[in-house]
Amino acid sequence: MAVIPKTTKGVKLLARLMRAEAEGDGRLGMLMVGNTGVNRVRVNCLDFTGIDSIRDMVFQSPGGFEATQKGYFYQRAREKDINLARKVIKGNRYHPASNSLWFFRPPGGCPAQWYGQQNAGRYKSHCFYNPLSSECPKAY
């Protein structure tokens, strides 16, 4: 059962995003990026109001993903990446990105806060940030 609306095209789009943003962090890193994307569709709060589909989330502007500006993102989705996307769409969550709405790759350590949001942890090259549950309860 999906936790967000999905189409075949949307699943492939999420798979491409996960690969483009985090392939260097391996399977688990890609799943965490997927968690962040799925959370953005689920929450309807803060920077992510009116995000009703995977497509809306991937191409949100401003506030979208840098990967959509790179040629690598536009390669065809691979079956193994599609399978990872399906996992997060089904609601599987991976710490520290379980409730995250933001992530980034800093040149050094993870700041305790990023744009006022709390650091949930780091996995390899990415730091993940959660909203406050009082500001965005659907993230939890």
Image (cartoon, rainbow, N blue to C red):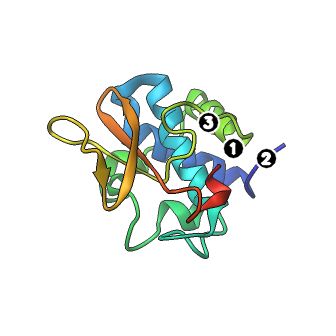
Mark 2 vs 1, N-terminal side: 2
In the rendered image, the quadrant that contains the N terminus is top right
Q: Residues within 10 Å of mark 1 (few under 14, many from 20)?
A: many
Q: Return the x and y of residue 67 as percentages of the image width and height.
A: 35, 52
As drawn, 138 above or below 120: below
Q: Which residue is mark 3?
A: 82
Report which quarter residue 115 is drawn in.
bottom left
- Marks 2/1: CA distance? 5 Å
- The answer to which of 111 and 108 lies nearer the viewer is 111
Q: Which residue is mark 1?
A: 89
Q: Return the x and y of residue 55 as percentages of the image width and height.
A: 58, 63
Q: Residues within 10 Å of mark 2 (few under 14, many from 20)?
A: few
- The answer to which of 26 and 119 lies nearer the viewer is 119
Q: Return the x and y of residue 85 as percentages of the image width and height.
A: 62, 39
Give SS at disc 1. helix
Depth-wise, is mark 3 or mark 2 nearer the camera?
A: 2
Residue type at mark 3 is Ile
Mark 3 vs 2, N-terminal side: 2
Q: Which residue is mark 2?
A: 2
Residue drawn 25% across the image and 39% down it: 110
- Marks 3/2: CA distance? 14 Å
Residue 13 seen in the current view: no
Residue type at mark 2 is Ala
| Pointers 2 and 1 in contact (C-beta within 8 Å) | yes
